[in-house]
Amino acid sequence: MLSLFFFLSSSFLILFFFRKTSALHILNQWFLSFENRLHLHQSFKIPRYNLHSQENSLYRKILTYLDSLPSVEDSDYTNLFSGPNPSDIFLHLDPNHTVHDTFLGAKLSWTNAAAAATGGADALVLRLKKKDKRRVFRQYFQHILSVADEIEQRRKKDVTMYVNSGAGEWGSAPFTHPASFETVAMDAELKNKVKSDLEQFVKSKQYYHRLGRVWKRSYLLYGAPGTGKSSFVAAMAKFLCYDVYDVDVSKFTDGADWKVMLMQTTAKSLIVIEDLDRLLTEKSKSNATSLSSVLNFMDGIVSCCGEERVMVFTMNETKDEVDQAVLRPGRVDVHIHFPLCDFSTFKILASSYLGLKEHKLFPQVEEVFQTGARLSPAEVGEIMISNRNSPTRALKTVISVLQVHSEGQRLSQSGSGRNSDDNEPGAVICRESVHTVREFRKLYGLLRLGSRRKEESYSGPIEKEAPRI
């Protein structure tokens, strides 16, 4: 009995070996080659980009469908990815590998052809028998689109971040920024205005078309560093469930690159250019970041090739220092100022970071703010995070830092009032101002040293501020 078992096992292994590596495998390849010579099969290529360098939406939907097929698990080589939720595992067909599918009795195969194999951009290649084409072709693609739409609807809240590379392509990663409009330290009335404006835009496709305008909207966020502009962009993306395209203009070599990258963005996207003021004021020898390139990117003909997009520009200075041609209506629709932290913003931050609605030190904090002392919301938030286990210490530290800042302002103002021709006193004031800044930084260092304890992690809200549209 045992010998019979070994005989059967050996026979099975030998047959399996020959099937995979020898005569049967060779015969199978010859048969497939013979079929191809008789033109029994037909192939269709779905490129990633169309002739105008825009993304082919059909490519993305088919790829979504293929990744959902059970046969992907049986493919020779499959990639595994985790989603925004680490417990979610996603399969993705590896380049130059094939997956099989069936539909209404027809057998079909898909190959994920990489750019090197197609002589251009990435593509998906469908192969099916000619006799099945007329019977299932249109119904099969309708089935693919239906399944892909259902999957995308389930993933609707997952936002993707895209960054342009030097190779002229967009790299992507899950966008996991925790900011939302609920965590924004902003005047409630202004916050509601922004949300209402975004909601109205999403519903206004027919209205824009009736006016003969492209369905897009643009925002300018301007204010000092640390006032929450970048986090506000994240809140907008989360609110709209739009993918984010973060444009790194340093990767562009000429004006044509701007246009190509813009055409590759998809609908339902937030296109972000940060530090617009620096971009426009830098004296660059190349023409890549010239004023004309920026203007064409904002409202040129190419910018009209895609709809349902929101453009966001940020600046660290006052908008008066930028050529007003850039900010005229039609190029920028909504202007939002992000000021430094005042007392009303401070109370929002104290409520979010420390859980304080009222405190006996609030009047003293308000009094210091009334002297004109200001900090950025990011600076106030950092103090509160460092002292979150002791709200009283956090408030006292804020008061101390504000007082240092107020004293620095007073010295600076008194220095500017002196005779500008008197060089020596001016130099003294300069040294005092530097000394004040050093004290400020030293105070932050002491805060960090005093806060080095074993503390539980804190997912505090993101600081945000802006008073008027």
Image (tube, helix red, strand yellow):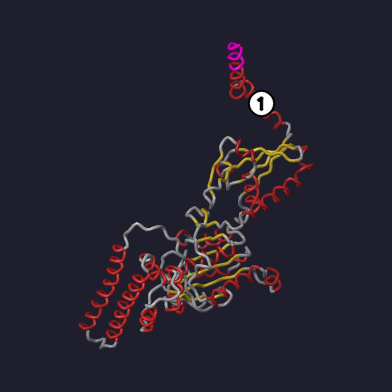
Task: Locate residue 51 relative to residue 451 in the image: left or right.
Answer: right
Name the spot of residue 403 as percent of width and height, x first: 31, 78
- The x and y percentages for residue 247 are 50, 61
Residue 301 part of the magenta segment: no
Q: Quadrant of the N terminus?
A: top right
Instruction: Indicate left or right for 159 with 44 as reference.
Output: left
Indicate left or right for 39 with 176 as reference: right
- Residue 123's place in the image compared with 252, above or below, is above
Q: Main secondary structure of the magenta part?
A: helix
Find the residue positioned furthest to the left.
Answer: 424
What is the quadrant of residue 401 in the picture?
bottom left
Residue that mark 1 sits on: 28
How far across and down, in percent of the image, does residue 116 sit? 55, 42
Amino acid type, residue under disc 1 in the picture: Asn
> Crowding at label 1, few (<14), some or many (≥20) Cα neighbours within 10 Å?
few
Which residue, as the protein is rendered here, is positioned at the far front? 360
Q: Tell me what residue is drawn at x 62 percent, y 63 percent.
A: 306
Asked which secondary structure carries label 1, the reply is: helix
User: Which residue sits at x=49%, y=78%?
Assistant: 467
The residue stretch that appears in magenta: 1-9
For residue 67, above or below residue 243: above
* Residue ID at (62%, 23%): 19
| Position of residue 185 measured from the top left corner of the image (x, y, whole percent) | 48, 72
